[in-house]
Image (cartoon, helix red, strand yellow):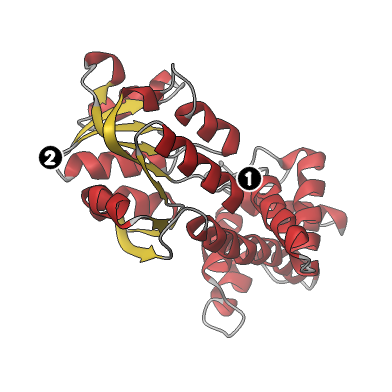
Amino acid sequence: MMLIDFVGLGSMGLGMATSLVRAGHAVRGHDPDASRVEMFIAAGGIAASESTTPADALVSAVLNADQTRSVLSNTQSVAARLRKGGVIVSCATVSPDFAKEMEAAAANAGHLYLDAPISGGAIKAAAGQLSIMASGTAEAFDLAAPVLDAMAETVHRLGDGAGEGSAMKAVNQLLAGVHIAAMGEAMAFGASQGLTPEQVLNVVSVSAGTSWMFENRGAHVVEADYSPRSKVDIWLKDLGIVTEIAATSGLPVPVSTNALAQFRAASAAGLGNEDDAAIAKYFARAGGITLPGDV
């Protein structure tokens, strides 16, 4: 059993943290939303204030680079409670250069660091069946193994230092963001031709044009359920990371750049805090079409 500090009990993080509890670990939960902490305690977690014992591992499942830095990089941070030689498992979507910076900062503080972005969604997070794209030293992988085993169905070992994990997550997010934007455009296009979202979802899901994101987010459109599991505004960050990395490398990414522009436009139209499937509403409105559940 390990003592683990877990930061970020959002839609993914809560399931990840409870998976660690289910595997027999003692897990202290940290989140600015007290209601999320209460949910975690009800699932067997420990309140952060209940123990000051140095942790063996820290899992950071926050939103972005700024929040990651806050968790890891000051004397009042959660990382300050990590024992010397403990391991940090950092799961946010960040740039490879930022991951390398955090690895160096962790080493300076006497900690191991695993660049370990995640994919799979809230349901797989709660089931301990995520895909983790990880890179780091062999020592970091060894110490983090019980943590990874509890949270993931598949752990991809991509390199012996931070950076490769975040690079692979950027590749994944390129495809995921483009597929969600394409789903929205397809739903709006189908509606313009007199097809219902349910018809489009049912047919495309068993045809060559389907994708995991089409099926998952298309179901949200059919159900007219835009409660945010992953917000439109997430893609401003994630596709922004993709385009910034590509620009640094001198690689044109016109499809990703256009998808990013569509998410930005949807956000500017007031959809930023809705589920990212609401990109379909943005496309439909542009054509004078009202999808189910839109007002």
Q: Determine crowd level at label 1: few under 14, some 14-19, many 20+ residues with C-alpha closer than 10 A.
A: some
The answer to whether the residue labelled 1 contacts the one labelled 2, judged by CB atoms less than 8 Å apart, is no
Q: Considering only order in the chain, which callout, 2 or 1, is on the residue closer to the N terminus?
A: 2
**Could you give the CA–CA distance between mark 1 and mark 2, rounded to whole angstroms?**
34 Å
| Residue at the image position 27 percent from the left and 39 percent from the top | 18
| Residue 130, x across and y down, in percent | 36, 57
Indicate the secondary structure of the residue bearing disc 1. Answer: helix
Helix, strand or loop at mark 2: loop
Give, as a three-letter code, the residue at label 1.
Ile
Q: Kindly indicate the quadrant of the structure image that contains residue 111.
A: top left
Q: Residue at x 62, y 67 (%)?
A: 175
Residue 222 position (above or below residue 8)? below
Tell me the quadrant of the picture where the N terminus can be found: top left
Q: Which mark is residue 234?
A: 1
Q: Is 173 positioned to the left or the right of 75 in the image?
A: right
Q: Residue at x 32, y 27 (%)?
A: 29
Q: Which mark is residue 193?
A: none
Identity of the residue drawn at 58% across and 62% down: 218
Q: Nearer the viewer, residue 8 or 290?
A: 8
Whole-percent x and y of residue 223? 55, 54
Depth check: give the residue in front, 158 or 15.
158
In the rendered image, residue 183, in percent from the top left (x then y), is placed at: 66, 66
Disc assigned to residue 1: 2
Between residue 55 and residue 127, name the one nearer to us.
55
* Residue furthest to the front: 108
